[in-house]
Image (spheres, rainbow, N blue to C red):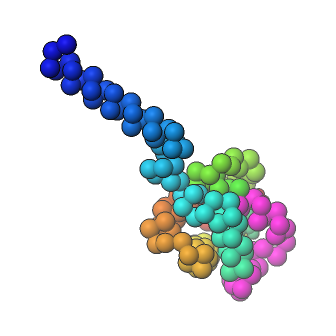
Amino acid sequence: MNNKAHHMTRNLVASLIVLLACVWMGGCQSAARPTLYQKIGGEAGLERLVDLFIQEIGRDKAILPYFAKANVSRFRQGFITHLCDTLDGPCDYQGDSMIQIHTGMQITEADFNRVVELLINAMTEAGIDHTTQNQILARLAPLRGVVIKM
Ligand code: HEM
């Protein structure tokens, strides 16, 4: 074997060892780059966050009226599954689309912004760091257009 081929073989073996170690240690993705779902503490963290969010809604005079006829435990479960899915957790939200759910609610831009504020309050109370908060908000931002005034 010439010198170059020898080097290539050695590099290949080294790469394979790194790859195998990575898989053996429980998955390269979770080791190197946790999902947002993992960053907020998985299922328990997500449930805690949503419960804090529901408490925030319950204390807000502008937002609470939207939920006058809502079934809170259904909302809680649907919101948890939807957020879990959105944050790359092991969930597949199969409920009604965001358009279907919010159509007819006449949600104003100001009230949408208020709900985002309530979510930020809940994330802060849950001890979620600001970088993670911003990443979560970035995932939800595209829904703004389908939730407002439909
Ligand atoms: C990005 C923003 C939002 C997301 C991702 C979101 C997500 C959801 C989800 C997943 C559900 C359904 C739960 C289920 O039944 O399966 C839901 C229900 C609901 N959402 Fe939103 N929502 C957003 C913004 C808003 C805003 C701004 C308001 C009001 C100001 C609002 C008011 C409601 C109400 C009242 C329900 C309950 C409907 C019912 O059960 O009768 N949502 N939302």
Extreme residue toward the front, this view: 1
Looking at the image, is 79 positioned above or below residue 29?
A: below
Question: Residue 123, position in %: x, y?
Answer: 58, 73
Quadrant (top left, top right, bottom left, bottom right) of the N terminus: top left
Ligand 1 in which quarter: bottom right
Residue name at image x 49 percent, y 72 percent: 129
Residue name at image x 75 percent, y 51 percent: 96
Q: In front: 17, or 98?
A: 17
Compared across the picture, whether 139 is left or right of 64 comes to left
Quadrant (top left, top right, bottom left, bottom right) of the C terminus: bottom right
Looking at the image, is 36 positioned above or below residue 72?
A: above
Main SS category, magenta section: helix
Res 112 visible: yes
Q: In front: 38, or 13?
A: 13
Residue name at image x 27 percent, y 29 percent: 11
Question: Residue 25, position in %: x, y?
Answer: 51, 44
- Residue span colored magenta: 57-80
- The answer to whether residue 68 is magenta is yes
Residue name at image x 82 percent, y 70 percent: 72
Residue 121: quadrant of the picture: bottom right
Compared across the picture, whether 129 is left or right of 52 comes to left
Q: In front: 143, or 87?
A: 87
Question: Residue 49, position in %: x, y?
Answer: 65, 70
Query: How many labels sit on residues?
Result: 0
- The answer to whether residue 147 is magenta is no
Question: Residue 14, position in %: x, y?
Answer: 32, 32
Res 142 visible: no
Extreme residue toward the left, this view: 3
